[in-house]
Amino acid sequence: MKPKIQTGLTLGLLMALAGIGLLMAKPAQAYHYMTAAKVNMRSGPGLNHGITGRLEQNQSVRVLSQSNGWSKLRTLSGQEGYAKSDFVSSIWIKVHKKERRVFLMQGDKVVQSHPAAFCPFNPLGDKLRQGDGGTPEGHFYLCEMIKEPGQAKYGARSMRISYPNIEDARRGLAGGLIDYQTYLSIVRAVKSGKMPPQNTALGGSIRIHGGGAGSHWTLGCVGMNDADIKKLYDHAAGGMRVEIYKSAEHDRELNRPGYVSRMILKGAKAQLKKPALYTRKAAAGGRLSYPLGDISKAEAVCTDIVIRALRRAGIDLQAVLHEDIITNPERYSRRIKRPDYHIDHRRARNLQIYLEHKTRPLHKMLADSAQEGYRPGDIVTMDTGIPNGTAYDHIGIVGDSKNPQGRYMVINIWTMGMHTSSMDLLAGDYPKIVGHFRAGHPFDYQN
C-alpha cells in the first residue's frame, strides 16, 4: 500500500522547513520507489494491457506521468510501462545516526525531523551480528507495523525494518555466521517483500519505535519520543523505504552524483599498478569461495577486471548475478540451465544480461535524451568476432586516460599472454561495442 500523506499538509510542512538546511547533497537515486514486490508493469494504464515486466520491492523508478490511478514509470534500465499508483511512493524515512535524527522525506524534501536514540555502547556501529548493539546501515523497508505494541520497551508505536537485508546476508555468509541455505532464505524473503528471517546469528527485530530519545538506550533499534513516533507512524505504511546512514557525511558521500562510477574507476586503475596475466589456468576457471570469490590476483580473464573493479564500489558481481539468476531464472534460461556461482559471473554473456536489467544501458536510446557519451567508470561490452555463439565476448571499464584524439581508453585484459592495460578500444570499428552501461546508486545493489 502507498504510504499515507496529505498533499496540503506536505506542502505546508515543506514551506516551514525549507530554510533549516537539514538535507545533504541531493540524492542520486530516483525519488519514487515500489512499495510492494512483483508488481506487474503493463504496456498501458489498465489491467487489460499486457504485462511487460515485474517490478521489485524497493526498486527505484522515475514517474513520468500519473492519471486515473496509474503511473507511467521508467526503470533504471530504461524500461517504460505502467503500474498502479498505489504501489508507487515518494514518501520515505531517512536516519542519520551520528546526528541522532530521523527524517520523514517526500522526495528530497524534509517533511518531519525528530531526535533519535541508539545503543549506548555502540551508537554508530553497523549491525553485524546478534547482540552487538549496532544499528544496521543501508536500504530497508518497513515489514511490520504495530500501532499498539503493548510492551513498554517499544513505546507508543513500533515499525520493524527488513533487517537483515541481502547485503547483510552476504556479509554474514562470507563471515561464517550463516550458511548458504539461510542466506538464500533471506534473499528470497527480501525479493518477495516479506519479513526476512529474524532468528539467525545476524540478529533481528530492528525497529523504529517509541520509548524516548533523550539519551541512548536501545539495543540497536532507532528510539524516538512517543509523540514523535506517533506523528511518523501516521504517515507510514508497510513497504515504506528506510535508508539508514552512519552520518550526514556518509549520506553526502554515497549520494554525490557519480559516486559509484568514481569507485569503479578507482578499482579498475588499481589493477594497472600490478597487472594481472591472462593465462590458460585463469580461463579454465575453478572452484571459488562465495561471496567475494576470486582466482589469484596475479591472473585474470576480462571479466575478472570488471568484477574486481566493481567490488571497490561495494558491488559483488558474483553475488548479485547469482541472486538474480536464482530469483529471475527466465532472464538467463537460454544461457544457464543450472546456476553455478563458481563461473557464471566470469562469463561476459551472463554479465551482459545482468547489466541490461540492473544498470543504465547507455547503448540504448532513452526516451528523454540522446545517447550519452562515455565517462570514466562506465562498463563496456564488446564483440571481438570470435565465433563462440555470442556477440558479448569481451568486457572492460572506461578509464580516465585518453588517446591522442581525446577518446577514453578502456582498462581491460585483452587475450592470452597479455596483461591488464589501458587500450584504445572505443575509437574505431573494431572491436564492435555492443553494450555501454553505467551503475546506479550503491543501495540499488543491496536488496
Image: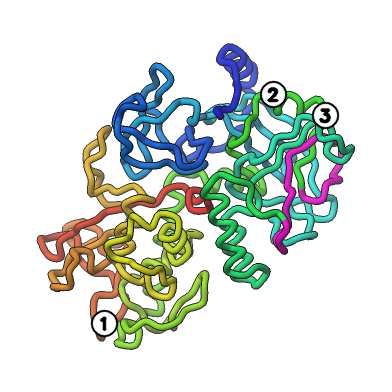
In the rendered structure, which amino acid carries the disc numbered 2?
Asp
> Whole-percent x and y of residue 241?
58, 38
In the rendered structure, which amino acid carries the disc numbered 1?
Met
Tell me the CA gap for discs 1 and 2: 61 Å
Earlier in the chain: of badge 3 and badge 2, it is 3
Could you tell me which quadrant the N terminus lies in? top right
Label 2 crowd bin: few (<14), some (14–19), many (20+), radius 10 Å = few
Which residue was labeled with disc 1? Answer: 418
* Residue visible at 44% across and 71% down in the picture: 341
> Whole-percent x and y of residue 424?
20, 66
Which residue was labeled with disc 3? Answer: 226
Q: Nearer the viewer, residue 360 or 26?
A: 360
Say which quarter of the image contains residue 121. Answer: bottom right
Assess whether residue 257 is covered by the magenta stretch: no
Earlier in the chain: of badge 1 and badge 3, it is 3
Q: Nearer the viewer, residue 217 or 325?
A: 325
Tell me the CA gap for discs 3 and 2: 12 Å
| Stretch in magenta | 199-220
Q: Residue furthest left?
A: 429
* Residue visible at 49% across and 36% down in the picture: 34
> Whole-percent x and y of residue 192?
53, 47
Q: Residue furthest right?
A: 152
Name the element at disc 1: loop
Q: Nearer the viewer, residue 100 or 21?
A: 100
Q: Is residue 269 visible?
A: no
In the rendered structure, which amino acid carries the disc numbered 3?
Asp
Using the image, determine if residue 32 lies above or below residue 280. Answer: above
Which residue was labeled with disc 2? Answer: 234
Earlier in the chain: of badge 1 and badge 2, it is 2
Residue 365 falls left or right of residue 2: left
Q: Nearer the viewer, mark 1 or mark 3?
A: 3
